[in-house]
Image (cartoon, helix red, strand yellow):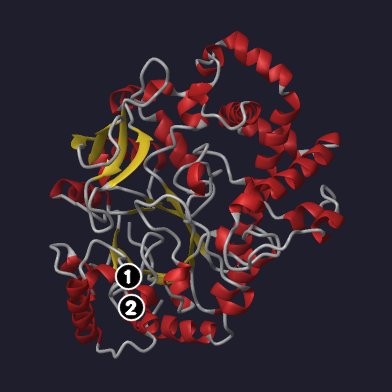
Amino acid sequence: MRFPRSSGILLHPTSLPSPHGIGDLGPEARRFVDFLADAGQKLWQVLPLGPTGYGESPYQCFSAWAGNPLLISLERLAAQGWLDTSALAETPKFPDNRVDFERLIPWKTQLLESAASRFLENPVSGFDAFCKANQHWLDDFALFMALKARHQGAEWTRWEADTRDRDPKSLARWQAQLAAPIAAQKFLQFAFFEQWHELREYARKHGVGIMGDLPIYVSHDSADVWVDRQYFQLDAHGNSTVVSGVPPDYFSETGQLWGNPIYRWDELAKDGYGWWLGRFRATFEMVDMIRLDHFRGFEAYWEVPASERTAVKGRWVKGPGADLFRVARAKLGDLPFVAENLGVITPEVEAIREEFGFPGMAVLQFAFGTDAQAPTFRPHNYPREVVAYTGTHDNDTTVGWWGATGSGESTRSDADIRKEMDFARRYLNTDGKEIQWTFIRTLEASVAATVLIQMQDLLGLGTEARMNQPATVGGNWRWRYRAGDLKPEFAPRLREMAELYDR
């Protein structure tokens, strides 16, 4: 596909300002859309929006279909009469520049449960229609979450055998016993999707499209795997026999062991990839275009025995290749996908991307090193159909990257970093002052059809604002910006660039 020339901001909703401890779909989200429109930006890229599990990573969710209740705006619930405003007045003191998940989750969960109880006493007319329209995933997901709560959060493989294995009698018994928490889970999904679709419509009216993010893998501890075990490589007890990851790379000498279960692509193909088509359809109902995370895994994926503790002893295994996308195109029509083609990319991967016209990605931070891929990230080598980033959620901020010497930020030595910085200075013709704006202008002026600026880079923040450090556990996905960080002068500066460079 040919995407129109445009630029936008990469910002997950959890990183928005909020008086309630985490960014949400309420007033600040609309203010951010207003900013994008004022700044001449046409895109807002978000990370996956599902209910987060292990480590609060949006790439490890309890469902590929559900929304994250932590994103529900409490102000909106109060305005609808489903939550006492007095409860909001008693909000604890949360940090204003990060998400304290440990304190936030029990507090907000209690308020959401209170809202569910009040709502379910007299549900609005659209609730039944929502539940019916989403029954194919909602019933199982609501039961899964209610069962997790009943089992004190234990993974589904640790539940009693008949529940773990979805014995019909066991499921019927639990559905009766857990009717109230199941209904509450359905309400939370109703509230999330109502607020999300209202926000998306607001963005559309302001000329802002939304790019979503679809992870190639799902979490093992999810309703998806519990319900459709036949599509995953599991043993008789539901445990993974092999898991996902990537070999040693820029971020880690031992690779990245993600731990997600590996698909049985042969079984998915027998069903005409119906499971995947359902994911694609559901995501397109929420966003205008989709970044396909770890696109190279569709051609070949790194498979690691589940007993391993690092990703070193893995192997490449062929995936479905172009077949999945041929079926998807036949069933769904044009596919506005962006292929995340970073890392070890082969000609076979690029052949699939080019067959369907999916633009790839280019990260400017990767342009100045000595590895074989670096020249493809230099703007003078860009094709038109590429999505160019200052950095992604996995990168350090541009300011942090610029001062990385001695930080231990990656597998690079200090000597390599100094060499890289020297090349960047000469290539960008910069003394490093406001390096983030040098990055932004370089991309805006490039031939790349789509440019995305990490919000931390727009704000000129350092490593303390990094969203995620790959191959690490804990402390990630917490960054938020403060309302005062978004300076009035940023919008006209971005708009001028958008106008100068026809974006």
Mark 1 crowd level (few <14, some 14–19, many ≥20, 10 Å Cα): few
- Check disc 2 and report its element: helix, strand or loop: loop
Rendered view: 35 above or below 173: below
Rendered view: 225 above or below 502: above
Relative image position of residue 49 (x, y in whole percent): 53, 49
Q: In this figure, which residue is indicated by the disc labeled 1? A: 407
Relative image position of residue 383 (x, y in whole percent): 22, 67
Q: Amino acid at mark 1?
A: Ser
Image disc number at residue 403: 2
Quadrant of the rendered image containing residue 203:
bottom right
Does the image show residue 349? Answer: yes
- Check disc 1 and report its element: helix, strand or loop: loop
Q: CA distance from mark 1 to mark 2?
A: 8 Å
Say left or right for 366 vs 238: left
Residue at the (22%, 53%) spot, across then down: 253
Q: In which quadrant of the rendered image does the C terminus lie?
A: bottom left
Rendered view: 177 above or below 459: above
Judging depth in this view, the residue of 13 and 157 nearest the camera is 157
Q: Amino acid at mark 2?
A: Gly
Does the image show residue 321? Answer: no
Say left or right for 337 vs 102: left
Quadrant of the rendered image containing residue 498:
bottom left
Residue at the (18%, 49%) spot, across then down: 351
Image disc number at residue 353: none
Say left or right for 21 vs 365: right
Residue at the (32%, 78%) spot, across then down: 402
**Residue extending furthest top?**
169
Residue at the (41%, 29%) spot, across then down: 274
